[in-house]
Each structure stands twice: as C-alpha cells, then as structure tokens.
Image (cartoon, rainbow, N blue to C red):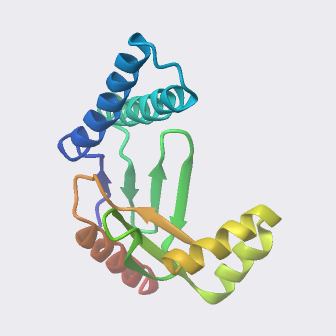
Amino acid sequence: MEDIRIYHSIWKNIALMAVCFGVVAMGIFMLLHGEQSFIVWAGILFFGGGGLFMLFLILKERITHTPYYMITDDRIIMNSGLKTYEVHFADVERFYLTKVGTERGKTKLIGIQYKENVELHKFEDASKAGRAVRRFNKSVAGSQEALPAEGLTIKPKELCEILNERVKNSRNI
C-alpha cells in the first residue's frame, strides 16, 4: 500500500487563527487605552502564542513538505511540530472516533484502543504524572491516548477508517 500524507488544512484553521489574532488586537487596543491588567496581558500572550504556533505548523508543513500525519503500512507517524510520535498498527486493537469538551465546543479525536498487554505496558512505563494523565484521558476520552482529528485535509471519519483498514492489513501480513 502507498503512504498517505495528511496536512493541516489552511482553510479549516484560518478561522481559528483569525480569532486568536482578533483577541490579540483587542488586547493591544485595551493596552493603548490604559487597561493594564494581568488578564489583558495573559490573553495577548496565550492567544498570540497559539495563533503563531498554528501559523508556524501550517507554514512548516507546506514549506518542508512534512505532513502532520504520515500513514505507512505498519504505523502512523504524527509530527506535532515539536516532537514526532509513532503508533504501530501491530500494537493496536482498533481506532475509534471520540469527542472531548463541552456541548458547545467538542473536539474530535481518534481514540487508540491498544491491545491489552501493550496498554498495560505503556501504563506501567509511565511516570506518576504520566499515569495520572493516562487515567484522566481514559475517563474523559475512553482511551489512554488519542490523535487530533480536526482541522486536517481529511475528515475524521475517513481518517479513522483508513487507520482501521491498516490495522486489519497489518494482522494479515
């Protein structure tokens, strides 16, 4: 099978970046008109940093031709911009769609249901803080680990189907 490259969608993320930079512009306007509060500065730093990071990811992907997700025959590789993360299909029982967040703003994720021995091994190898995060993820998303599935050049359902097809094919090899 051929490798599949998935990138962040410029058009799906432009609204997010516009909101981030809009909040920054409002914060700067407030600073220029005498409002010198911690909240204004925190908003500028948080939303400015988030907008710039999203812009950095999209530009880096396009300029270097490095996809956010690379799906091969035996694994999915996620390049988060800071770190590369791999999930081997041989370790996975199945992938499934899940949503996390409030009713107004749910984020779509692809949950990873590892094989029982692999999930136990990952939990035991984690630090105390890592175990706490894994327990929290399990209670909120239904799995210890999940992959972001929004704002990409592919729909979350299609991505999940491709991943499950690769898991099925990896068992037949």
Q: Position of residue 162 (x, y in %)?
A: 29, 72
**59 with respect to 123 (left or right):** left
Q: Which residue in the rendered view is the most extreme toward the left?
A: 11
**The quadrant where residue 47 appears:** top left
Q: Position of residue 88 (x, y in %)?
A: 53, 69
Q: Which of 43 and 39 is in front in this view?
A: 39
Q: Can residue 91 be seen in this view?
A: no
Above or below, 149 relative to 62: below
- Which part of the image, by quadrant, shows the C terminus? bottom left
Above or below, 87 relative to 84: below
Above or below, 48 relative to 13: above
- Residue drawn at (23%, 70%) of the image: 158
- Residue drawn at (73%, 69%) of the image: 132
Q: Which of 76 and 129 is in front in this view?
A: 129
Q: Can residue 166 be seen in this view?
A: yes
Above or below, 25 relative to 99: above
Q: Where is residue 90 in the image (x, y as percent from the top left)?
A: 53, 78
- Which part of the image, by quadrant, shows the N terminus? bottom left
Q: Where is residue 81 in the image (x, y as percent from the top left)?
A: 48, 39
Q: Which residue in the rendered view is the most extreme toward the front?
A: 34
Number of numbered discs on residues: 0
- Residue drawn at (38%, 37%) of the image: 54
**121 with respect to 78 (left or right):** right
- Residue drawn at (66%, 80%) of the image: 118
Q: Which of 135 and 64 is in front in this view?
A: 135
